[in-house]
Image: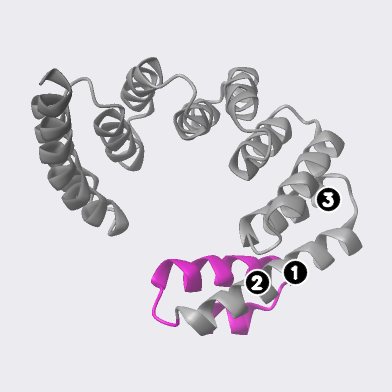
Amino acid sequence: LAGMQKWQRFHAADKYIVEANSFLDERLGSSALGKCDWAISIASDYAEAWKCHGDALYILERYKAALVSYQKAVALEPKNPKYWNNQGETLYQMGNYAEAIAAHDRALAADKRNGAARKGRGLALIGLNRYSDAVVEFDQAIALDPSDPKSWENKGLALEYLSNPTGAREAYQEAIAVYDSKLTAQPKSPTMWVERGRVLSKLQRSSEALAS
């Protein structure tokens, strides 16, 4: 009976989480936060409700509060790599690069093929000026998922810091190729067009970047 009641609470909370995720897709953090609050009021022992709460606070750039929500999610599901990566990304935004790496390490302990953890480690290593180590992480992320443009773009950034403009250009061109492929399938994705334009500007293809 207790298990059934728990499932019913989680199922009821999911309704608000789905609505919150729609707001998050539009980057409407305040609207999403209200829905996540409802989900938590129904099921405060539901990790996904706390993740939802953290995601809304993250978009609002309230990183300390977001970290607390992600910590509550991970306390409920300590073997879920997603929640550890959420913590790592938030710690990165707070400038706590060594702590960010430790959080991504916990994600990798739960799932050694977790590409998001490799990307997160790479960004934190850039923050620590460990650019060669960062390139290694992005290469591992690319090996796991070569169709992730962010891994290619971040590799390009690390190579720029290493004064390797040729390598950086090649990585940025790979990122553009991936965006072009994805935009064929999702031509109306505003986020992807903006991100593609950002990479084009790094290649100094400004007219194309403006068009994107």
Of the numbered discs in the image, which one, if any, rests on residue 174? Answer: 1
Is residue 204 inside the magenta stretch?
yes
Determine which residue is flagged by label 2: 178
Q: Residues within 10 Å of mark 1 (few under 14, many from 20)?
A: many
Q: Is residue 80 above or below residue 35?
A: above
Tell me the SS state at disc 2: helix
* For marks 2 and 3 on the same chain, the one whose residue lies earlier in the sequence: 3
Q: Residue furthest front?
A: 1
Q: Residue at x 57, y 22 (%)?
A: 103
Q: Residue at x 50, y 27 (%)?
A: 84
Q: Residue furthest top?
A: 75
Which x, y percent locates residue 36? 18, 36
Instruction: Please indicate whether residue 151 sits to the left or right of residue 211 in the image.
Output: right
| Alpha carbons under labels 2 and 3: distance apart | 19 Å
Tell me the SS state at disc 1: helix
| Alpha carbons under labels 1 and 3: distance apart | 14 Å
Q: Is residue 187 above or below residue 190?
A: below
Whether the residues at callouts 2 and 3 have beta carbons within 8 Å, the answer is: no
Q: Which residues are magenta?
A: 187-212
| Alpha carbons under labels 1 and 2: distance apart | 6 Å
Residue 37 can be seen in this image: no
Residue type for callout 1 = Glu
Q: Is residue 157 above or below residue 114?
A: below
User: In the image, which is nearer the foreground, mark 1 or mark 3?
Assistant: 1
Residue type for callout 3 = Leu
Which x, y percent locates residue 60? 30, 40
Residue type for callout 2 = Val
Tell me the SS state at disc 3: helix
Q: Is residue 183 above or below residue 87?
A: below
Determine which residue is flagged by label 3: 159
